[in-house]
Amino acid sequence: MSYGRMQEKQQQLKEEVKHLLEQAEAADEEEDRRYGKQRGDELPEELRRRETRLAKIKLAKKVVEQRAREKAAAEGKSAEEAKRAKPDAKDQYNFTDPESRIMKGIDGFVQGYNAQASVEPEMLLIVGQCVTEAANDKQQLAPMVEAIEQQSGQRPEAILADSGYCSEQNLAHLESAEQPERKIEGFIATGKREHGEHRLPCKPGPLPKCATRVERI
């Protein structure tokens, strides 16, 4: 359910609950008049079902709102800006599998996860793996380096990765400026190209001093 639909459904359920309570109160008064004072604390099934659904939607809204704040923080927004961040009306929550996300695959959009695997080049053994709910790989290089160290017992000397992992933050992590002995040599594609496409080499001449890490690679 999308965040926008949650807001609509929440209001609808509140109105239905109010209406059912009014009906129940009128029915109780009529029964009390006819048969004397009754218990009247039994919750009708229709009302119980709506109250349960309302609670689930309320929880889902909180989760989606928290995701929006975390996303804003990850994008470098200030703490105050991240705190005020609001979800997009199309941001969705899956009640069956809340940790999954809508992701674009080769066959279109799917509800699922992003599986990560690192393979060493000689024996082609998987030396690190994990599953994440992140829709792309931009934030996954650092966690995968950690996974390799934990799962294989060694820190890689070099990493070869596609353009999905290319970012200033990822390249800075490989450099490990604070701990030069932990530096990892990175061979990361800076962009995509079509099959059979050939690109001209870079223009000759030294790179400017202000060149970014991506430009240098």
Image (cartoon, grey):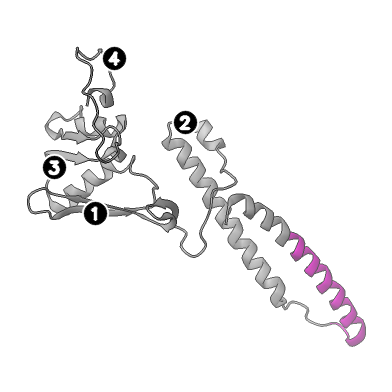
Q: Main secondary structure of the magenta part?
A: helix
Identify residue type, mark 3.
Answer: Pro
SS category of the residue bearing label 2: loop
Identify residue type, mark 1.
Answer: Gln
Label 1: which residue?
A: 129
Tell me how far mark 3 sits from mark 4, CA to CA.
Answer: 29 Å
**Residue 198 figure quarter:** top left
SS category of the residue bearing label 1: strand
Residue range corresponding to the magenta coloring = 14-37
Residue 193's x, y, as percent? 29, 36
Residues at badges 1 and 2 in contact (C-beta under 8 Å)?
no
SS category of the residue bearing label 3: loop
Tell me how far mark 1 sits from mark 3, CA to CA.
Answer: 14 Å
Q: Nearer the viewer, mark 3 or mark 2?
A: 3
Task: Examine the rendered structure and indicate whether residue 197 appears above or below residue 97.
Answer: above
Label 3: which residue?
A: 156
Of labels 2 and 4, earlier in sequence is 2
SS category of the residue bearing label 4: loop
Of labels 3 and 2, earlier in sequence is 2
Identify residue type, mark 2.
Answer: Lys
Residue shown at 24% from the left, 28% from the top: 199
Residues at badges 3 and 4 in contact (C-beta under 8 Å)?
no
Q: Nearer the viewer, mark 3 or mark 4?
A: 4
Label 4: which residue?
A: 210
Q: Among all residues in the image, which is located at the extreme front?
A: 196
Residue shown at 12% from the left, 53% from the top: 124
Residue 25's x, y, as percent? 83, 72
Residues at badges 1 and 4 in contact (C-beta under 8 Å)?
no
Q: Is residue 205 left or right of residue 88?
A: left
Label 2: which residue?
A: 77
Residue 181's x, y, as percent? 11, 32
Q: Nearer the viewer, mark 2 or mark 4?
A: 4
